[in-house]
Image (cartoon, rainbow, N blue to C red):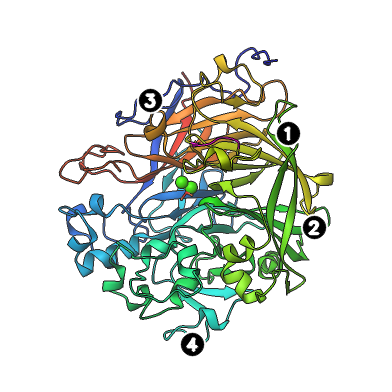
Amino acid sequence: LAKKPAKGSALGFEGIAPTPANVDAVKVPEGFAWAPIISWGDPLFADTPAFDFDNQTPEAQREQAGYNCDYVQFHLGGAGNNGAHKGLLAFNNEYTNDELMFRGISSSDDLTDEQLEIIMAAHGITITEVARRNASSAWRWVQGGKRNRRLHTDSPFAVTGPAAGSAHLRTKADPRGERILGTLNNCAGGETPWGTYLSGEENFNQYFDATGAPDPDGKLKRYGITSSGRGWERVQDRFSVTKEPNEVNRFGWVVEVDPEDPTSTPVKHTSLGRFKHEGATIALTADGRAAAYMGDDERFDYIYKFISKAKYVEGDKKHNMTLLTEGDLYVAKLTGDGAADGEYDGTGQWLPLVVDGRSKVPGMSVEEVLVWTRIAADKVGPTKMDRPEDVQPSPVTGKIYAAMTNNTRRTAAQIDEANPRANNKHGHVTEFTEDGGDHGSLTFTWKIVLVAGDPNDPQTYFDGYDKSEVSPISCPDNVAFDGAGNLWIATDGMPGTLGWCDALYAMPVEGEDSGALRQFLSVPVGAETCGPTILGPDSVIVAVQHPGEVDGASPDNVVSQFPYRGDGQPRPSVIHAYRRHGR
Ligand code: FEO
Ligand code: CA
Ligand code: CA
Ligand code: CA
């Protein structure tokens, strides 16, 4: 029986209608405004040159905001004080649209060596101080902020965990296998309880050219490492797998950065395994260990959980920053309880891959399990999911929510209760409840709370809510919570599936309003909504990624001019949507 819609919205805003896919505008609810906080190319340091589209240099880009913002983390307060109008913003720069960064580019063959260096410098992570005039104005980046920092393809990272220093990570430039230059394809992420920044290295395969490289046991193939198409091997030999076979093993990790300390060395944690990490989010177990939940974004790949050996110590950041260096790694198996109950739900187990420093996978060492985690997981029988993206624990209930974005390759013969649709164009969101409410548990129950699509499609499901009252949604990707425990969902791919711009939604997941999905915002033509950070019911930060990413678009044939500064070019930007006061 459908639930009755509650009077008004429990979410504090009136939902907006879907925006047609060709509209080059940011749409927000009535009473809200939006403004860019920082855009690609904005200068971070006092002496950094201003962005100049036609005169870009690698040196400038290494000190300017990177391209294609994704996960966003926000810390309120100034360095050393609690300024209510100061803050710190850190965000991933996942990849670049080379054809939109420069004129006259139709393939990577057209890129000069200098342009390739600019592209490499535009990848990574951007950290900047932000400020606002007062409590009702928008946040804006601060050029020259003390904590400002850029991490890019040539920035050094330390390596932790059992695979640090392993033979699989050693290269000519780093014979000890413990210092890696760069972080690549940083997609989603998470904030740790100790205030650091976690970031997932996702589709790192695209930067490596493996043409002619031997692959006797299919390790390169399992990670999609073929030929790059990006041309990076032309300027740095390490991106050629034949010239430097182990460099590719140094990407695909979870990265941890202390954004408050610009002199700190960022790290790659091998204990959390190597795959196409969407991101990692932390919850504490009943006995105080850190559990990290992680998706591997590939069709038919898996959801993982890491549990630290050591316990969290409140207030001891130095100790807590060692938690992800040692612990146990598991992969999820979901078992359905049948269709008779009218719900897609069931029980599950966390299957061990590494426990107490020992491999649980026959024929593979701990180092091998961590470097080729996908191959290890294949051997223990986890559930093949429909592209597991972002995973987020609710701060109110402790339940875990994971977005399965889509999987159009799943056939009718391959459906199961956890991935119940063949040709799954629209994706779904699954809720996990750890047994005993303990993130240290190795068993759980699960339930699909959203089967996405047009609500008129009888296959869709909005946690039992009246479907005449909800927004259409497709391809859930990033998930986040507000302080009240409402789930926020950003999409990636709606123009291709439902014909509307990608968008941001909020959906209660508890009580009589659960499933009442409403649209909060939509992004411009060609763009994807990423990194939602919900500061409060009146204040939301969103990363607008790849505006203008449309076949055939170029700087001379622009389809998006977001963020509309009059310079004619689309620039990926982190924006602030906030309620206008006094109206
Ligand atoms: Fe970069 Fe899986 O989205
Ligand atoms: Ca069932
Ligand atoms: Ca994503
Ligand atoms: Ca995505």
Name the N-terminal-most of marks 4 and 2. 4
Verify CB contact (< 8 Å) between mark 3 and mark 1.
Answer: no
Residue with the mark numbered 3: 19
Q: Identify which amino acid the numbered label 3 is placed on.
A: Thr
Q: Identify which amino acid the numbered label 2 is placed on.
A: Gly
Residue with the mark numbered 4: 175
Residue 338's disc number? 1
Within 8 Å: ligand 2 and the Cβ of disc 1? Answer: yes
From this viewpoint, which residue is outermost toward the front? 413
Q: Quick one: SS at disc 2?
A: loop
Q: Is residue 162 visible?
A: no
The x and y percentages for residue 170 are 50, 83
Within 10 Å of disc 2 (Cα), the crowding (few <14, some 14-19, many 20+) is: some
164 or 578, which lies in front? Answer: 164
Q: Is residue 528 visible?
A: yes
Q: Identify which amino acid the numbered label 4 is placed on.
A: Pro
227 or 72, which lies in front? Answer: 227
